[in-house]
Amino acid sequence: TAVAASTTSLGTRAPAALTLRVVAECSRSKARACELRLPHGTVATPVFMPVGTQGTMKGVTAAQLDNLGCRICLGNTYHLGMRPDSGGFQMVSLLALSEVTEEGVRFRSPYDGAEILLSPEKSVEIQNALGSDIMMQLDDVVSSTLTGSRVEEAMHRSIRWLDRCILANQRPDQQNLFAIIQGGLDPALRRKCLEEMTKRNVPGFAIGGLSGGESKEQFWKMVTLSTDQLPREKPRYLMGVGYATDLVVCVALGCDMFDCVFPTRTARFGSALVPTGNLQLKKKQFAKDFRPIDEACTCPTCQRHTRAFLHVLLHSNNTAALHHVTVHNIAYQLQLMNAIRTSIVEHRFPEFVQNFIKTMYGEVGHCPTWAVEALQSVGISLS
Amino acid sequence: MTKLIPIGCTRRQGYRAIVLRPGAQELENNFTMKLSLSRVVQGCRLGTLSNLGKKGDRCMEFPGCLLYTRTGSAPHLTHDTLQVISGVPAMTQLTLSSLAEHYEILEEYKEGIGKFIGMPESVFYCSLHDPVNPCPAGFVTNKSVSVWGVGGRLEMTVAKFMAIQQALQPDWLQCLSDGEALCADASSSKRAKKSVDRTLAFLDECLKLQEQSEVLRSCVMIGVIEGGDILEERLRSARETAKRPVVGFLLDGFHGDAMTKETRLRLISSVTAELPENKPRLICGIGQPDEVLECIEAGVDLFESFFPYQATERGCALTFSFDYEPNPEDMVLQQNGQKEGEENGEHIDKIITTKCVPETSFEINLKEKMYRDDFGPLVGGCSCYCCKNHSRAYVHHLLVTNELLAGVLLMMHNFQHYFGFFHAIREALRKDRLGQLKELIYRQAC
C-alpha cells in the first residue's frame, strides 16, 4: 500500500508529495526494499544519504554525485538559512551556543553577541524557501546520555513543535514534513512519543535523539522499538547512522533511510572505507601499494588510481587527494546499500548479512555483541 | 633558398640541408618531435608541435600553455572534473620539486609518472621548480642543485637527477640548471657567468648519462638559457645551448621583479634570435595575460598555467576578455565584475570597504559582499561547468563558508578561461587580428 499523490480529473493534486511502494520484504527480519517517489525524483531504499551541510558535498560536484548514483542528499537548515554572513563563525557545535525555550532555539553568536531565534515556524519557512523534497520538524533534541525530566520535557515539546511545523508548512503538496521521534533511551517515553506522533498525518518519520554517546546496546533497542510502532507504509529515517555495520543491522531492524557525516568526513582525513573496515592511506604501509583502494569498487578513484598515488597526494597540499577519497567513500556507501537492497529483493538478505559480518570481522566471534543480539532479535543468526 | 639546420633531437652531431618551401615552413627533425611553423606575425610564432609522446602520436599548437599540476595532479581536480574542462593542453607540466622525494616509489612502480598519477594519455614536461613556490636561494653548487619537497631539501647531483628522471620517465625534462643569477642583492656579471657555465656543464654531463640509458633516451632534454640580466651571458648561453642536442629551450630567470620589463623583453628577444627556429621556446614564471603577449612577441612559444591557479587561491575568477570581435550582446554580458545597472563608482567603493582587492585587474574577487546575491555566472557567455551550473552568489557562499568546492569550481573556470585565452591568441595570429587582441588585453591591464 502506498500513500498516493493522486491526480483528480481536473488535474489538481491532493496534498501529498511522497509515495512509498514496498517492493520486497525480508521474510525473517524487518528489512524491506522500497521505492520512494518524491517531487524531484525516485529513490530506491534502503538508502544512505550523504551529508552536504552547507549546500555542497565537500569538494565533490553535483555532476560527480549524480554519476555515483546518488539520488538524495542532505542540507542543513541553519547553515543555509540562518548563518550570519561573518566568515569566522564556525558551526562546531550548535548546542553549545544555544538556549531552548518553548518559543524555539535561540542562538547567540560568540563573536558579536547577535541573537537569532530558530522557531518551528522559522525553520519551516526556511525549508519552504529551500524547496527540499523532505523537510524535518524542528525538534527539541537532548543528548542521549542525559537522563531525568529534561528528556521528558524535550519529548513533549517536540510533539508540540511538530504540530506547529505542520501548521506552518506552506507547501505540503511539494514538500514532505517528517516528524522526529524523541524520548531518549527511555522506552516508555519513546512509546509515548510514537503513540502521539503517529496520530499526526505526516508523510514520514525519523528516529532521532540517538547516535550520540549512548551504548550500542541501548541504541539498537530504541531503534527496534521505534520501527515496531511506526506504520509500514511510511518511510523510516534513522538519523545520524552511517557506519557499515550499523547500516546493515538497522536495515534488518526496519529502517529505510540513513544519513551521516562519517564517510565524507573520514575521507578528508585520508581514511578510505573498504569491506574489511578502512585504510588509513596516509600511513607508510601504503607507500608502495599499487592496488586500488578496493579491487571490486567501480568508483572513478578505484578505476584510475592506486593506494600508492593517493598516499603521495594525501601528503601534499593538493585538495584533489581529499576529493578522490570522498568520491570513493560515497561510492562505498551507495554500493553497500545497493547490495543490501538487491539481497532483500532476491530474498537472501539473511545470507547477505552473514557474509557481510564475516568479511568485516573475519569471524563471527569478533562481531560486536550488540550487533549479534540485534540481528538475533529479528531472526538472523550469525553462527 | 637552403638553410643548414642542426639535427636537434638525436645525439648525433651533424647537419642536414633542407629546402624551405614558400608558404608553410616545415623544419623537420628526423626523430621524435616535429615543429611546423605556419606563420610568424610581428615576431609571434604560430605553429604545431607533432610526434609528441612516447608513441609519437600527440600534437600541440603554439603559442600555448601546459597544464599546471601540484604533486602530479591538477590543483583541486580529479580526472572527472578535469576532463569537463574545454581546451586542456596536450602537455602537462610536472615539477621535480613535488615528485623527486618519491622517486624510490616510482622506481619500484616501474611504469613511469604518467601512469602513476592516472594520466596515461598525457605528454609530460618535468620542470625543476614550481613557479608558484619560490625556493630558497643559495643552494646551487658546481656539483648539485636542490629542490624543496614536503620532506625538506633534496640535493641532486647530475647522477641523482638523472636517476630520478629515469624513474619518472617524462617526455621532456628541464635539464639541471643554475637559475640563481639574480638572487643575490646585487646583480653581478660574475654570478651571471657562473650560472651559464654551470648550466652548460650540467647539460653536457646529463647528455652523457642519457646515452648510457635505454630508458632515458626517450626522455628528451630541454636546454636552459641562463645569464641573469647580462646580455653577453644570455647570448653565450643561447648559442652554446643551441649547439647541444636538446629538443627545446627554457628561458629561465625572467620572472619576478629582478629586471625591468624593458630589459626583460629586450633580453628575451635577443635570446630567441639566437635559437633555432625549429625548436620550441618555453618560459617559466610568466603568466599574466599582458606579459604572455609581450613574450610571444619576443619569440616565446610555450607557457605554464599557474596563473589561473593563483587566481583560484585568492578566491578570484578570471574575467578578462579576449574576445576582440565581440557581438554587441556579448559585450553587455562580459562586463568585468559588474552587476547590471551598477555604476563604476559604486563598484570601486565596495572594493575599498570590504578590503578584498583582486590581485590583478584580470579577475574579480568572489569574496566581496557585492556577489552575495549576484545570480549571474562568473563570466557571461562562458561555457565552463561552473558558469553553466552555478552563480557568483553560490561561489561567494562557498568561499565565505570555507568550503572545498569553491576551489574546485574556481579552478575549473579559471583553467578553461585561460586555455580559451591561448586559443584566442592562436586565432588572432591566424586571422591577422593580433593588434586588436593586444589592444583589448592591454586595456584591461592595470
Image (spheres, coloured by chain):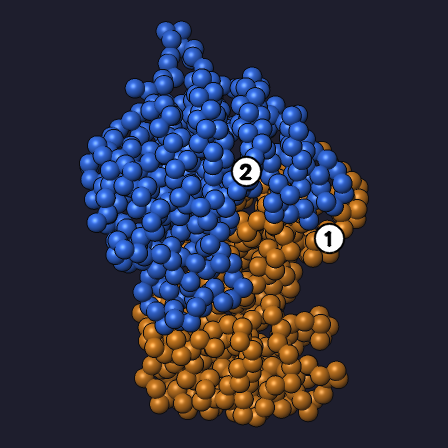
Disc number placed over residue A147 in the picture, else none: 2
- Chain letter of the residue beneath label 1 in the structure image: B
Distance between the Cα atoms at labels 2 and 1? 53 Å
- The kind of secondary structure element at disc 2 is loop
Is residue A7 something that shows in the picture?
yes
Is residue B327 something that shows in the picture?
no
Disc nearest the viewer among 2 and 1: 2
Letter of the chain in blue: A
Quadrant where the C terminus of chain B sits is bottom right
The relative height of residue A291 versus residue B86 in the rendered view (above or below) is below
Quadrant for residue A247, please give it: top left
Q: Nearer the viewer, residue A188 or A62?
A: A188
Q: Nearer the viewer, residue B343 or A48?
A: A48
- Chain letter of the residue beneath label 2 in the structure image: A
* Residue type, mark 2 in image: Thr
Give a yes or no on whether discs 2 and 1 share a subunit. Answer: no
